[in-house]
Image (spheres, coloured by chain):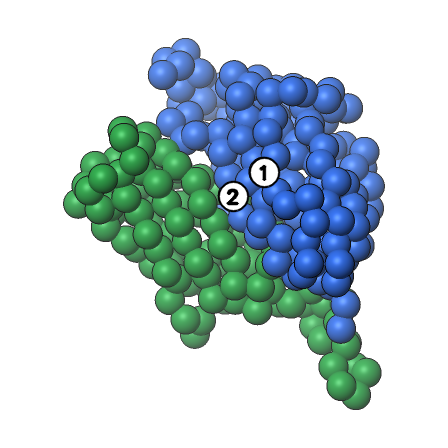
Chain colours: A green, B blue
Amino acid sequence: MADPMRIRASMTGDKVEVKVLMAHEMETGLRKDASGNAIPAHFIRNVTVTHGGRTVLSAQWGTSVSRNPFLHFRFKGGKPGEKVTISWLDNKGEKRTDEAVIAGG
Amino acid sequence: MDAKRREVLKTGGGALALAAAGIIRPGEAFAQEWNKAAFETKSVAETVKALGGGASTPSGSIEITAPDIAENGAVVPIAVESKLPRTQAIAILIEKNPNTLSAEFEIPAGTDPFVSTRVKMAETSNIYALVIADGKYFHAVKEIKVTIGGCGG
């Protein structure tokens, strides 16, 4: 099981500013280990962010998103105390869902 | 808020229209799919095509915020902001990486046409911010010089 995401969601004016740090190796599949064997690709493919049952961002990623991915975006329609839920799914079928409460501005 | 766009997106017709425009493939709106073909492309033109576009037009309404020189290619911060009306998606393409497409974000109504993330760059390269707005494809380019590549072993 992957480590939890670190999520910060806070009001900036009338928008919710979301910053996420995910724990994932994001292995490209192009690297080799010390004995010359290829290290298999292992990376997050899908990210979905929802608020109040509505998708506020969805992403598809390739292997060139950096290790321990960072994501920052903003959406309208959220209020302090409400929840933002973030899920990811990787190429091996592993997944993780975490949520954060929107903090006041 | 663009009420009309919301209305169109809410209906099944909207989804079909998006599918017809190649922005989403049938079924994609309902399941988590991954556009394998797009992530295997090896040039900017191929990626645009795999994401459903014919060609993309340079636009001054797309802003890329990224360093001019990245000392460490493994962690290059890139932010893209679109000022194009009805921005539906933002993609980050790295021309000289083994695979061009790095990330694609779908921007629903109500979400700012802005994303910021960190990517790996194998070597000095142009990066393209591709924006789909109102069904059309636009891009901006920025060169980032890389001191140490981020994809090697």
Which of the two labelled residues, at mark 2 and mark 1, occupies the earlier sequence position? 1
| Image height of B1 relative to B90, above or below | above
Crowd around label 2: few <14 · some 14–19 · many ≥20 (10 Å): some
Q: Amino acid at mark 2?
A: Ser
| Image height of B42 relative to B20, above or below | below
Given contact means CB atoms under 8 Å apart, are the residues at marks 2 and 1 in contact? Answer: yes
Instruction: Identify which residue is drawn at 24% across, 46% down.
Output: A102
* Residue A27 picture location, percent across and down: 64, 67
Mark 1: which secondary structure?
Answer: strand
Depth check: give the residue in front, B86 or A52.
Answer: B86
Depth check: give the residue in front, B22 or B81.
Answer: B81
* Residue B144 picture location, percent across and down: 72, 45
Instruction: Identify which residue is drawn at 35% across, 55% down.
Output: A7
Instruction: Identify which residue is drawn at 32% across, 52% down.
Output: A8
| Total tally of numbered discs in the picture | 2
Mark 2: which secondary structure?
Answer: strand
Q: Amino acid at mark 1?
A: Thr
Q: Is residue A96 left or right of residue B147?
A: left
| Image height of A10 relative to A40, above or below | above
Res A6 → quadrant: bottom left
Q: Is residue A31 left or right of residue A97?
A: right
Q: Nearer the viewer, mark 2 or mark 1?
A: 1
Q: Is residue B37 left or right of residue B90?
A: right
* Residue B16 picture location, percent across and down: 55, 23
On the image, numbered disc 1 is attached to which residue?
Answer: B65
Residue under mark 2: which chain is it in?
B
The disc placed on residue B116 is 2
Residue under mark 1: which chain is it in?
B
Crowd around label 1: few <14 · some 14–19 · many ≥20 (10 Å): few
Quadrant where the image shows the C terminus of chain B:
bottom right
Residue B26 in view = no
Instruction: Identify which residue is drawn at 68% across, 58% down.
Output: B71
